[in-house]
Image (spheres, rainbow, N blue to C red):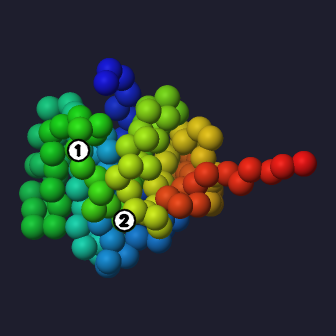
């Protein structure tokens, strides 16, 4: 699949809000699709105590940066980073998936999410919605520069809007 998502790091206050909105905790396995420098993975393990965090990064130079950051934090035993296309990686063990992609890419990921993720798996997206899915919760977060960011939480099994018949 061909797509191009510009790299824009998620501000740390937004990372914390995403993981809080998802209810991240010690039993969770977090997958970050397009993990960039690994910041979501590191915060998930260090501050939220998740059991494991996995990053998927297609860009080789950012993949190397993420590996370096994980090593600098001494988290190699709890964080894995793969240089791969997110569409080709099995994400079925995830209990939380984090995204900062584009709406069009989120739409392309819907079949993968529905095929691989178990009911109850939480997907939290920074700024871009998953079209056609029911938002479980959303919030607006202000970063350290005063900019606002939208965060959307989806839950597999609750993500399809109810059909109403009149």
Quadrant of res 50: bottom left
Q: Nearer the viewer, residue 120 or 16?
A: 120
Q: Position of residue 11 (x, y in %)?
A: 42, 49
Crowding at dot 2, Cα within 10 Å, few <14 / some 14-19 / many 20+, comes out as many
Q: Position of residue 16 (x, y in %)?
A: 43, 62
Q: How much space separates mark 1 and mark 2, taking CA atoms?
A: 15 Å
Residue, x 32% and y 21% (percent of image)? 2
Residue 47's disc is: none
Crowding at dot 1, Cα within 10 Å, few <14 / some 14-19 / many 20+, comes out as few
| Horizontal relation, residue 113 to residue 44: left or right | right
Q: Nearer the viewer, residue 142 or 49?
A: 49
> In the displayed structure, would residue 29 be above or below residue 143?
below
Q: Residue furthest right?
A: 166
SS for callout 2 = loop
> Is residue 141 in view?
no
Residue, x 16% and y 67% (percent of image)? 78
| Horizontal relation, residue 120 to residue 1: left or right | right
To which residue does mark 2 refer? 95
- Which of the image's four quarters has the N terminus? top left
Mark count: 2
To which residue does mark 1 refer? 89
> Is residue 163 in view?
yes
> In the displayed structure, would residue 46 be above or below residue 82?
below
Residue, x 20% and y 31% (percent of image)? 59
Q: Position of residue 115 (x, y in %)?
A: 38, 49
> In the displayed structure, would residue 117 be above or below residue 29?
above
- Sequence-wise, which precedes: disc 1 or disc 2? 1
SS for callout 1 = loop
Residue, x 35% and y 52% (percent of image)? 116
Question: Mark 1 near mark 2, Cβ–Cβ under 8 Å?
Answer: no
């Amino acid at each position: 699949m061909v797509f191009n998502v510009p790299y824009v790091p998620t501000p740390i206050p937004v990372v914390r809000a995403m993981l809080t909105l998802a209810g991240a905790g010690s039993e969770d396995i977090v997958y970050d699709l397009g993990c960039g420098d690994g910041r979501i993975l590191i915060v998930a393990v260090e501050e939220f105590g998740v059991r494991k965090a996995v990053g998927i990064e297609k860009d080789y130079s950012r993949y190397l940066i993420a590996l370096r950051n994980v090593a600098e934090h001494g988290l190699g035993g709890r964080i894995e980073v793969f240089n791969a296309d997110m569409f080709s990686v099995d994400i079925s063990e995830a209990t939380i998936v984090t995204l900062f992609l584009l709406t069009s890419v989120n739409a392309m990921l819907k079949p993968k999410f529905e095929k691989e993720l178990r009911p109850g798996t939480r997907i939290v997206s920074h700024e871009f919605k998953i079209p056609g899915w029911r938002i479980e919760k959303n919030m607006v977060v202000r970063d350290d520069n005063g900019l606002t960011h939208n965060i959307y939480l989806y839950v597999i099994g609750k993500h399809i809007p109810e059909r109403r018949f009149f």
